[in-house]
Image: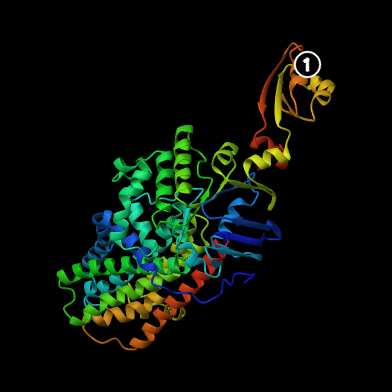
Amino acid sequence: MKQINIYALPELSLRFIPIWQRHFLVWKKMATTSILGHLADPVIYLLGLGFGLGSLLPQMGGMNYLSFLAAGTVCYSTMNSATFEALYSGFARMHEQRTWDAIMNTPITLDDIVMSEILWAATKSLMSGIAVLSVIWLLGLSHSALSLWMIPLALLVGLCFAAIGLIMTAMASGYDFFMYYFTLVITPMMMLSGVFFPVAQLPIALQIASAILPLSHAIDLARPLMSGSIPPQTWLHLSVLLGYTVVGFYLSLVLFRRRLSK
Amino acid sequence: MTPVLEATQLRKIYDGHTVVNGIDLSIRRGECFGLLGPNGAGKTTTLRLLLGLIVPDGGSINLLGVSVPKNAREARQRVGVVPQMDNLDPDFTVAENLMVYGRYFGMSDAAIEARIPMLLEFANLTSKRDAKIPTLSGGMKRRLTLARALVNDPDVIFLDEPTTGLDPQARHLIWQRLRELTSQGKTLLLTTHFMDEAERLCHRLAVMDNGNIIRQGTPRELIEQNIEPQVVEVFGENVERWANAHAAEFSQRFELSGETVFCYVQDAHALIAHLQTQTGLRFLHRPANLEDVFLKLTGREMRE
């Protein structure tokens, strides 16, 4: 009891629910802008590249380019939603607005707060995933009932990138710090994970790097689901995404405990 | 009667630096207890320890009958906190802030809704129910923070410098509300470095410096036991020369601070008679107060 054990396993409770409700209430006030934000960027890229490049490319990965890109777009937009929420909004709540301080004066603990941040960021991913999927369905880019599995996948991708993103938030001294993460992690990941072109096009060294990136595994699940087949190695991909989630959650919690125990 | 809050030999060390150095506190139900001290004395760290937000390096805490930090969650269920820095939710209205905060205590929306009118009235914010936080004045934000701390109808309320940065009108309104709370039987623990605040509000005080409690008692006791009853402040040209020549002759103790000499005396008659003969010197005769005690105990040098 003399020394706080920052390495202790998380103590989970349902106390995260009122925090999630708080975030939802904030979101509701800006829902229109938020949904527009979820949609505009990915849909512009999808249609711009899809029609522009797609007209030059007869096929990619055994399908037309627009459909190929659609699966990648859902994955990277859900990744981005969770990442922005965990980094910028999470940091604002922890540091700028001191929302976490206010909450920790109640029966809620830091473990509950970190849990709520991950679940909320994943909720944003879910919303963003559903928004982009709706456009894809409306455009007739995916007809398979299997594409409904994209909804839970969006949630899982959200959990995974929220957990990893919170590690950054826990280490950040200010918003500028996040630029490292975007330029060194997120942008390369988009290029290496098969969003815009098949990973097989990459040099072998980069293909190996790609295999350890969570976004690659998300896309390996998404592309077959969108085109109506059951993904090979489903359990492997799910395990990798879950593994990143669990490890990210634990690491970020340890770092937050260290940061906030002063 | 068992105390509401008891801390024994409480100690906290950061990076080899002792911030709280084995303090003992015992606070009774319905009491307003003040922790006084200059910046960096360890007041806020003490509050955080008592709330179970940080783990002590030694000692024990019992808050509302449970052991802290072990069962801090249970203790905080019946505690309200007014933090030093405002952390209201800027995206919400006044009423939404209370609703969202009440949910953190596991209260039902109906139960919170039922308390909101009473809380708004207490905070003089009834007409501001639907106002956004950035439109409120500093005093209104503080009152809302106080109302928010009462949403769970706590038995004990922690206040960390509740009136810092407020104008006198806003401060007096907060004081009045805090007195109402103690008259309702709530227990208050507040930190402050305003001596008039401590003298008016607190039943008992502890003066902290460098992590230690150096004195404890009622405001009256602290003044009577630590300082001469009368103070004569002397100022004007050549006050320093006068002090070196005469101050010791007429006062038990004197201090030169800037351009003022503070003479502490049992009986001021002889000193005043003498000062009336001195041209170029002005003086102010007043009873000793808590600020005199505080400065005597913690020194006049700046703490930064």
From the image, tell me which residue sits under label 1.
B274
Label 1 crowding class (10 Å Cα cut-off): few <14, some 14-19, many 20+?
few
Vertical comparison of B280 with A169: above or below: above
Could you tell me which residue is drawn at 24 percent across and 69 percent down? A130
- Give SS at disc 1: helix
Residue situated in front as seen by the camera: A40 or A148: A148
Q: Amino acid at mark 1?
A: His
Is residue A173 shown to the viewer in this render? yes
Outermost residue on the front side: it is: B1
Q: Quadrant of the C terminus of chain B?
A: top right
Could you tell me which residue is drawn at 29 percent across and 40 percent down? B127
Is residue B210 shown to the viewer in this render? no
Q: Position of residue A103 (x, y in %)?
A: 44, 59
Q: Position of residue A42 (x, y in %)?
A: 28, 64
**What chain letter is assigned to the residue under label 1?**
B
Q: What is the number of callouts on the image?
A: 1
Residue situated in front as seen by the camera: A139 or A33: A33
Q: Quadrant of residue B301?
A: top right
Could you tell me which residue is drawn at 50 percent across and 54 percent down? A174
Could you tell me which residue is drawn at 60 percent across and 64 percent down? B61
Q: Position of residue A185 (x, y in %)?
A: 45, 67
Q: Quadrant of the N terminus of chain B?
A: bottom right
Give left or right: position of A25 versus B255.
left
Vertical comparison of A190 with B212: above or below: below
Q: Position of residue B278 (x, y in %)?
A: 76, 12
Give left or right: position of A95 versus B267.
left
Residue situated in front as seen by the camera: A157 or A21: A21
